[in-house]
Image: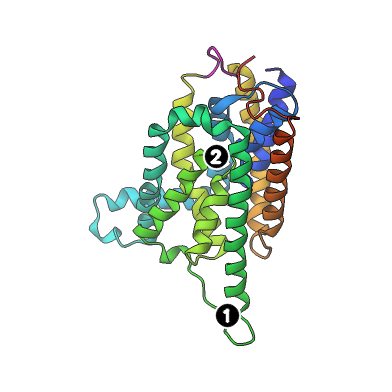
Amino acid sequence: MSWFESFILGLVQGLTEFLPISSSAHLRLTAAFADWQDPGPAFTAITQIGTETAVLIYFRKDIVRIVSAWFRSLTDRGMRGDQDARMGWLVIVGSIPIGVLGIVLKDQIDTTFRDLRVIATTLVVMGVVLGIADRRAARDEAGGRHRAAKQRKSLQDLSVKDGLVYGMCQAMALIPGVSRSGATISGGLLMGYTRESAARYSFLLAIPAVLASGVFELKDAGGEGQAPMAETLFATVIAFGVGYVVIAWFMKFISSKSFMPFVVYRILLGIVLFFLVGADVLSPHAGEVTGG
């Protein structure tokens, strides 16, 4: 991997991590379209540490408050009903599915799931799901001629059951093309949460999973068949800077805008990818050997 490739892939990671379009798919596709070697899941996991650092800084006040309340709830019974302490427990509960499935499906994540036909399928299918979820949210918010607008749930309404559903949605993002934010936001919208609440919990829920995955993959970074460590760290720094700008923009965007532009983009990209693979313009296993 050259320094130029590292820069471009770090830029792609930062631009796509928080948008519901799948950063892992875009890293894979960028390498395939440019005829580069696939940077691999280890590179993806480590560069995500950069974007999650952006989340830590952007939500620093919320995170400090949640972590503090959670620790106090361990010894103070009176704190166990505190909203911030509950959120700490719910982030832990929601992280269980991806932790378990990440270990069980590690071989498939590194190989089968990176097939471009799989990515094309998940781009289209999850695009349709996000579109349905977005339309339902819009209908509730606007009401209609014969129905009143429906009050959607906030994070204060989050339960253990809903936290686990969010967690299962997040675990689906182990497959490139699904999108961590896209899956969890779709799940939240379908469960009746507001766009902002669904996105906020999605970002908080990702922190332990992404950081744990990145640290776990550090042992393989720079090894045989993996992207060089120096270039990987450079891409991580780029991803952090770009990611912070994107998350700030995205949180403002969702407060008043629909997710439909992302839905259309996902579906069109998936269709184009199917066409290119079907026409033998692009191999479904393009650039599978990592490293260099």
Label 2: element kind? helix
What is the quadrant of residue 136 in the picture?
Answer: bottom right
Q: Does the magenta portion include 90?
A: no
Residue found at the far front of this picture: 279
In the image, taking residue 48 as reference, residue 259 lies left or right, namely: right
Residue found at the far top of this picture: 224
Q: Position of residue 117 (x, y in %)?
A: 62, 36
Please report the residue visible at 48 percent of the width from the left and 25 percent of the height from the top: 217
Magenta span: 221-227
Marked residue nearer the N-terminal end (2 or 1): 2
Please report the residue visible at 51 percent of the width from the left and 71 percent of the height from the top: 152
Q: Position of residue 120 (x, y in %)?
A: 64, 41
Please report the residue visible at 54 percent of the width from the left and 57 percent of the height from the top: 186
Q: Mark 2: which amino acid? A: Glu
Q: How many marks?
A: 2
Marks 2/1: CA–CA distance:
35 Å
In the image, taking residue 178 as reference, residue 235 lies left or right, namely: right
Q: Is residue 240 visible?
A: no
Q: In this figure, which residue is indicated by the disc labeled 2?
A: 52
Q: Which quadrant holds the N terminus? A: top right
Q: In this figure, which residue is indicated by the disc labeled 1?
A: 149
Q: Are there few (<14), some (14-19), or many (20+) residues within 10 Å of tag 1?
A: few
Q: Position of residue 281 (x, y in %)?
A: 76, 30
Q: Nearer the viewer, residue 49 or 56?
A: 49
Q: Mark 1: which amino acid? A: Ala
Q: Are there few (<14), some (14-19), or many (20+) residues within 10 Å of tag 2?
A: many
Label 1: element kind? loop
